[in-house]
Image: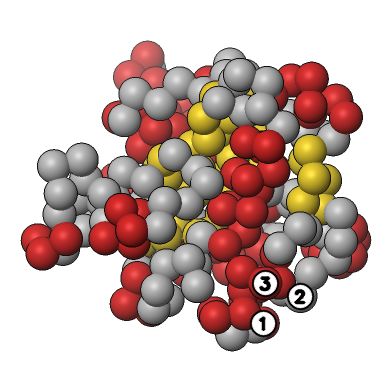
């Protein structure tokens, strides 16, 4: 084998099939699929990540809901809307346990957050209930946070937050009932209380739908003294599918 053939062979070997279309890719997602996922040009609300329409667009890029009733978090970074084929990626990770999808999501989130110059002091993920963790065997948001942590050179904090009571699966209950479902479901751990004071915390979740879970998490972190909360969510359910954002 000559030098060029050996080089071509080693490049081929370093490629992995795209998780969506199986064509060769460097990090598990080919450029065409990545472009399809990230090509939304419309501006998003800086605070909640919803796409802004012309009518509600303000100079600060805040949506009407955030202007009227600001959530506890300060910003939301999202890669994409939760629409096909993104729903497939989330399904592969959560329900088919294809853990190779998590680094792909983590890398895309890293690109989205660096584009916005977000530089958190600490990184953590929304904890699962003990019951859900036992059922699934892993926390998908922690898995995404691991890749992000490597790229940010900040190890994710696994024990900053606790779920203090089991809640119904948010996807199983009506959108209007979700806020009540997660009310007082989280607490900052004793270790977390010493870490979060005056710090900018990034909270990772795979999908943000109504925003109730992340609002509740941000509330407890702020109560414990965190100065700033940025949500990092892989996909955002478009507002027309959720109705009012913080119901
Ligand atoms: Zn592809
Ligand atoms: Zn908003």
- Between tags 3 and 2, which lies in front? 3
Q: Secondary structure at mark 1?
A: helix
Closer to the camera in the image, 77 or 225: 225
Tell me the residue at 41%/40% (across/down): 75
Closer to the camera in the image, 138 or 24: 138
Which residue carries the number 1 mark? 172
Which residue carries the number 3 mark? 180
Please tell me how crowded label 3 is: few (under 14), some (14-19), or many (20+) other residues with Cα within 10 Å: few
Q: Quadrant of the N terminus?
A: top left
Looking at the image, is mark 3 or mark 1 earlier in the sequence? 1
Tally of marks: 3
Q: Secondary structure at mark 3?
A: helix
Closer to the camera in the image, 230 or 36: 230
- Between tags 3 and 1, which lies in front? 3
Q: Which mark is residue 168?
A: 2
Q: How is the image coloured?
A: secondary structure
Q: Is mark 1 within 8 Å of ligand 2?
A: no
Instruction: Calculate the distance from the C-alpha at mark 3 to the C-alpha at mark 1.
Output: 13 Å
> Are discs 2 and 1 less than 8 Å apart at CB?
yes
- Can I make out residue 102 in this image? no
Please tell me how crowded label 2 is: few (under 14), some (14-19), or many (20+) other residues with Cα within 10 Å: few
């Amino acid at each position: 084998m000559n030098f060029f053939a050996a080089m071509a062979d080693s490049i081929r070997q370093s490629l992995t099939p795209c998780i969506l279309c199986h064509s060769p890719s460097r990090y598990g997602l080919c450029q065409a699929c990545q472009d399809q996922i990230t090509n939304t040009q419309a501006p998003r609300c800086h605070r909640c990540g919803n796409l802004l329409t012309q009518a509600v667009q303000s100079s600060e890029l805040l949506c009407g809901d955030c202007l009227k009733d600001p959530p506890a978090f300060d910003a939301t970074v999202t890669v994409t809307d939760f629409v096909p084929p993104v729903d497939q990626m989330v399904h592969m990770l959560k329900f088919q346990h294809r853990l190779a999808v998590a680094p792909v999501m983590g890398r895309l989130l890293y690109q989205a957050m660096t584009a916005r110059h977000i530089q958190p002091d600490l990184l953590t993920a929304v904890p699962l209930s003990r019951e859900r963790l036992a059922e699934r065997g892993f926390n998908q948001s922690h898995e995404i946070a691991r890749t992000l942590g490597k790229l940010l050179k900040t190890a994710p904090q696994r024990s900053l937050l606790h779920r203090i009571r089991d809640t119904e699966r948010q996807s199983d209950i009506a959108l209007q009932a979700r806020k009540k479902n997660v009310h007082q479901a989280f607490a900052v751990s004793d270790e977390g209380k010493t870490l979060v004071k005056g710090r900018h915390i990034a909270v990772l979740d795979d999908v943000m739908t109504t925003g109730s879970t992340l609002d509740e998490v941000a509330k407890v972190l702020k109560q414990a003294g965190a100065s700033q909360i940025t949500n990092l969510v892989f996909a955002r359910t478009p507002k027309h599918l959720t109705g009012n954002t913080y119901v």
